[in-house]
Image: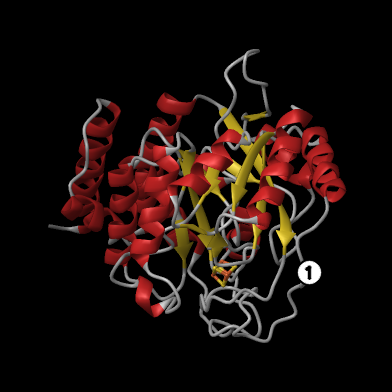
Amino acid sequence: MNGASLDMGHREWIGGLGRRVLEGGRLAREEVLALLELDRRGDILELMAWANRVREQQHGNRIRLCSIVNVKAGGCAEDCKFCAQSAFYQTAAPRYGFIEEQPVMQAADEAARNGVAALGIVAAWKGLEEGPLLDQVCRRLEALAAHGQVSPDASLGIIRNQRVADRLAGAGLRCYNHNLETSRRFFPQQCSTHSYDDRLQTIRHLKAAGIKVCSGGILGLGESRADRADLVLALRELDVDVVPINILNPIEGTPYAGQTPLPPLEVLKTIAVFRLVLPRPEILVAGGRVVNLRDLQGLAFLAGASALMVGNYLTTVNRPVEEDLQMLRDLGFEPEGYAAPGREEAPDIGGHADDAAPSVVLETPA
Ligand code: SF4
């Protein structure tokens, strides 16, 4: 085949997969992997165009916004290699204990002013057990629910006990972020202090409690394209509601400080493949997008993303919210805020995403 016919063959093949998804069909693992293996710019742009159609079909032209507030920072006893908040690594990330209610409510006011749909309270610790700390967390969630202008979300690590998830639900929690981070195969190279199965179990407890699940991962850890395929297929299997995509922002002091960044087109291609595999869930552009996508950030939405984390990340500063809102309006999107339950359908969006390297400004706690 010459170059032109090869282009046409790829375009037809990509179009066939895109049409199948638009008609309600699913992609097989080998198809997902083959899409992730596309390297030619023209093929990636074709793929993005189909992912954009799927986003438009499922989500229209609105982009949901969420923000996070770090209620306990740094000193985490886990050893996630991408995380600036791990006590295993010497980083410049802030450290403080569980914060009072007032700064959480200030963050809620700011989120509401920015038209943000959801505010996730995030803590750098292994997870939540029954006890006084859970009581305090529930009080913060109840205060957020009473505030009434942002959806009360959270990202608070591993949950091993169904009663904990039930308490959170009772306090008004709508959506909980707990990322798989990467494939089952690659996860043990990222963290030795808890397991992939711990994460799966947490998600099962959340679902049993009726809490929406926000779960995604981090790109750029050195994972293979097969690892990305298996991550997105695991998320499809779990039927999650929101999928944050973080991109490693290598933080000085972590094992990934010198990691080579992914090319922006590789990131955009991956977002597009995630959209074709996951038509219905929100796909949330989270930590690391400013440093990794730079001027191409807006293309993430034309590659299928339907949600955006705005405001600062956990350990890094994001760009001003107004710049993000302007970017979305310039692209013809409608940034979507919160509608209290009972008035209109309330957006279900996750609390935060991790950041790689935490990065991402973010990092996801557990
Ligand atoms: Fe701790 Fe979460 Fe960071 Fe892992 S990702 S070190 S669990 S804060």
- Quarter of the image with the N terminus is bottom left
Type of the residue with mark 1? Tyr
* Camera-nearest residue between 26 and 78: 78
Measured as percent of width and height from the top left, residue 181 is found at: 44, 62
Q: In the rendered image, which residue does mark 1 sit on? A: 96
Where residue 315 sits: x, y (%)?
A: 70, 67
Q: Is residue 160 visible?
A: yes
Residue for point 62% across, 29% down: 332
Residue most extreme to the front: 131
Residue 5 appears in the rendering: no
Residue found 41% across the figure and 25% down from its top: 57
For ligand 1, give the image quadrant.
Answer: bottom right
SS state under label 1: loop
Q: Crowding at label 1, few (<14), some or many (≥20) Cα neighbours within 10 Å? A: few
* Residue 349 in the image, given as x and y percentages of width and height: 56, 37
State left or right for residue 251 relative to residue 185.
Answer: right
Report the front residue among 4 and 255.
255
Query: In the rendered view, would you say 188 is above or below 255?
Result: above
Q: Residue at x 42, y 26 (%)?
A: 58
Q: Position of residue 313 (x, y in %)?
A: 69, 58
Q: Is residue 359 above or below residue 57?
A: below
